[in-house]
Image (tube, rainbow, N blue to C red):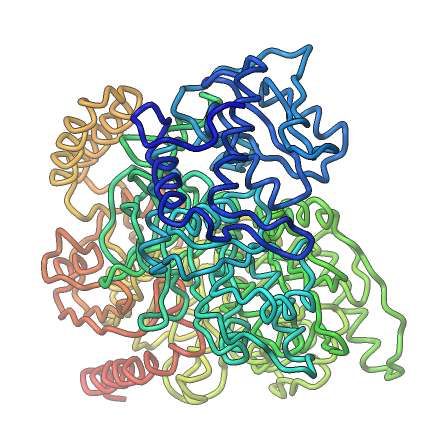
Amino acid sequence: MHAQRLSLDPGNRSALFRKLAACAHRAEHSTVLLGPGIDALSFGRLINEVESIAARLSDAGIRSNDIVAIANPSESEFLVTLLGVMRVASAAPLDPVLSEAELSSRLSRLGAAALITRSQAASTADAIKLTSGQTRRRVPDDVALILESSGTLGAPNLVPLTHANLNAMAAALEDSFDLSPDDRLLSILPLHHLLGVICALAQLLSGGSVAFMGAFDAQRFLIALGELRPTWYAASPTIHHAILRAAENSSDGIRSGSLRFARCGSAAIDPDVLASLERILGIPIVNGYGLTEAGPVAHTSAQHRKSGSVGRSIGPVIGIMDAAGTLMSAGRDGEVVLRGDSVTPGYLDDAANSAAFRDGWFHTGDLGHIDSDGDLFITGRIKETINRGGETISPLEIDAALTAHAAVQEAAAFAIPHPTLGDDIAAAILLRNGADVSEADLRRFLATRLSRAKMPSRFFFVDAIPRGATGKPKRKLLSEKYAAPPWPTAPRNETSDNLESFEESIAGIWEHVLKRSPARDDNFFAAGGDSLALTVLLTAIQTDLNLSSEIWQRTELFEQPTVANLARIAAECPSDDSARGPRFADPGCIVLQDAGDDPPFFFFPGAFLGADYLRHLAHVLGKNRPFIVLGQSTSNDAQGIPDFHDAVNHAVDCIRRLHPSGPYLLGGHCYGGVQAFETAIRLSRLGAPAPLVALFDTPTPGYPKPMKRWRAYLKHARGRLTHFRLAEIGDMTRDAAGHVKFLYSRRKPIVAVAETAAAAPTLPSPQPATVMRTYVPQPFSGAIVHFLAGDQAVTSRVLEDARLSWREFALGGFEVVRTTGSHRSLFEESNAGQMAGRLRDVLETATRRHSHVNPA
């Protein structure tokens, strides 16, 4: 027989085993592993079993740089075997329910030297089987554990964790949970995943015990609380859901008097579920964040918990980086990066390392931010984000909004292809038992919680949401399953001739816009439409059916744009009784509010945005202020956007035709603000009274001044030079050279000014990105009022905030107004009211000033 007890001499492989041996010396006869049907093990017997397995492996020719795979359905044997393998080699725990083909594939990829399965004999060590016919992979001597992770590239990566990594992870849990020999873990997470392994190791190294209950069953779990008397457990959100349902339905009460806390990991958990479970069990649930590559990273605590936060670091250094690799300040979103003793030194497959390990940081692929208190907030995954028409959207936010509905048990948002938006949003919904909710109900519920950009176009009610072993939804699988757009046709149930006529007219307009004949219940967005296309559709419907602008205020029209719904709303919408048709009818002109005697407010929306997102502002400005949207495509090409010069020339013609006497009140958002400013310049050159320009979060093209950027690029390039990132430096210097070239081009305007509205400039046709970089503002005799999004700090130095640089060109005065919301949410219903109050005053002041200067 080989050595029966681990010694404390330096020959041991790691501090982890020295700690384990020390615990055995202090309490050799204390029970350490127990559970129903398990031969309870004391610390002394555990050490003997570990040494026996290690000796058998050594005798079989296994060396410290070999990999030994383990597939054992008995969790207690699994843990003992895992420790025995780690004593002499690298352990690769596998899911014991893998098929023979899957097991063979995993062994081949690992390059495992041996496989240990469940023993049919008395000793686990008798189940050692050497693999043959494959190349053995050699790993560094200090590797203790090899697990599989999706990594940051999507393909599975082999993650080696050293003895030092595991020791750091276990120590972090032991310290943050204040574990002691009096604690007992109820192990219900699989040991072929890191959280299950590291929780068990942390408990053993603190001198306490680990209890097993066999295959998880929620009812059996409630019984185990009373029989095994654990002080804590760790589980995924899915398991916590099951425990909550079992606890709510239990007639025997919950015997959890020994529990002092529980840990939730592997994926995000619904805050309502967490709160309900805490109430029923009477303990705090510690939410957290971790990865296979770094172990547990952050924890919440009962005393310090913020909504939406996964807590503060329990060991690793956490940073937030932008795409250029620069660490970001508190509150700013970016990629979560880590470094520290618990972080793996790198994947076994070198090809995956360049993307994940850079400049001493591990790039997690998770998106988030850290607030000023050091609390971490995870907002999504880089590879799972949905890019809907240029808007980057985290599916986690949509998941949370959906699960807040009382009828929804689980939800998973995911991307589906869209012909013009790139990605569109769909959501898989699992309802609670006995619950009944319609798609329309969910849309109404989400309308107060999500912006329209985040509203799913399609909902799929499912029996189960596919999830990985860690509990995270398989969004890629959902995307693949529902990628093909269905074209359902609902049975007719309306008999009104008027409604049928509206449906036929709307279907004809729809077909003209999207080049596809629709069914009654086709969703416009799912059928290939986008925001601009919807604007074209609604404008045509309003004009052809002679409807008032009230159609733009019907919120459900944007939530469920089907032929049937559009026809119903059109039938309910009052017609325009004017004999000459709509008051402000003009090609490319969209009227969101046409009533009232006040001078109209002409507005240019942001690039690639339709008019519909401005409907809330038009509504709250009041029924006496006409609101007209310009700069839209005058063709039926919904995928295009008007050329800058064409849009401005058309706007000048349109404004002078619809409102020839002034005053001219112009507004614009972002790119639209530049259009509004250039339109005001041209109106002034044609002899019109100086217009008022209201800008909305519009950066000044060319600012901050390029010379400052050139110096910053050079400084950044010098820093990068030490890391030999020549390709990146080349990109930066080319970009900087472009800024220097632009610096000299400012001596001469590159956007020509037409002397008459009909004179089109014979210049290239810059699109939004080019215009925002190269347009050169000229001095403007009128006033500018700039509404700034409140989520971005305002500085008095124009070189640091391009939005303030417009004051250099406003000869008639410049005013800054801060409002709520972000650059994209300024005009949402929750923000539009506050902004409209000040805008109304600005427009009325400009109107009075014009009346005083130009009396009738």
Occupied quadrant, residue 506: bottom right
Occupied quadrant, residue 124: top right
Does residue 156 appear anywhere in the picture?
Answer: yes
Q: Is residue 535 above or below residue 742?
A: below
Say which residue appears at 63% left-offset and 76% top-offset: 247
Say which residue appears at 62% left-offset and 66% top-offset: 224
Say which residue appears at 23% left-offset and 54% top-offset: 700
Q: Is residue 624 above or below residue 827?
A: below
Does residue 638 appear anywhere in the picture?
Answer: no
Location of the N terminus by quadrant is top right
Between 171 and 558, the one nearer to me in the picture:
171
Q: Position of residue 53 (x, y in %)?
A: 56, 28
Q: Position of residue 642 (x, y in %)?
A: 47, 51
Between 87 and 190, the one nearer to me in the picture:
87
Q: In this rendering, would 726 be left or right of 413?
A: left
Q: In this rendering, would 500 be left or right of 690?
A: right
